[in-house]
Image (cartoon, rainbow, N blue to C red):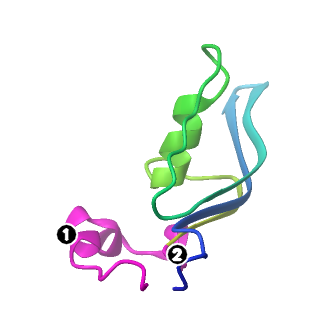
Amino acid sequence: MRPTEPILSARGVTKTYRTGTHEVHALRGIDLDVRAGELAMVTGPSGNGKTTLLNCLSGLDDIDDGTVHIEGQDLFALSDRDTAPSAWASSPGPST
């Protein structure tokens, strides 16, 4: 990975919660890039999707549409074994 490429990249991420006939659109087409050394903050009022966004970007929650890539790898195409903390700890990280 080149140093200018993001270590986290999200494109078109959507997440909708459904309960019976009610739908809550928590995330609608989120695009985000975070590069090595950058600091990103997620702020906003309660109920605006901050925790949902972080859960989706970390793989804790599935997404309905879009893609999330971590160091160039599609997060939702990885197996549980590949997403375990020990798998990432042995990763060489971005090349410089």
Residue 21 spot, x, y in % from top left: 79, 25
- The residues bearing labels 1 and 2 have C-alpha atoms spaced at a distance of 18 Å
The residue segment tinted magenta is 71-96
Closer to us: 22 or 57 = 57
Residue 87 spot, x, y in % from top left: 25, 74
Q: Badge 2 is on which residue?
A: 77
Picture residue at 52% right of the left edge, 31% below the top: 51
Image quarter of residue 12? bottom right
Image quarter of residue 96? bottom left
Closer to us: 71 or 52 = 71
| Helix, strand or loop under label 2 | helix
The disc label shown at residue 14, or none: none
Mark 1 or 2: in front is: 1
Q: Going by the image, does 81 lie left or right of 44?
A: left
- Amino acid carrying mark 1 in the image: Ser
Picture residue at 29% right of the left edge, 71% below the top: 88
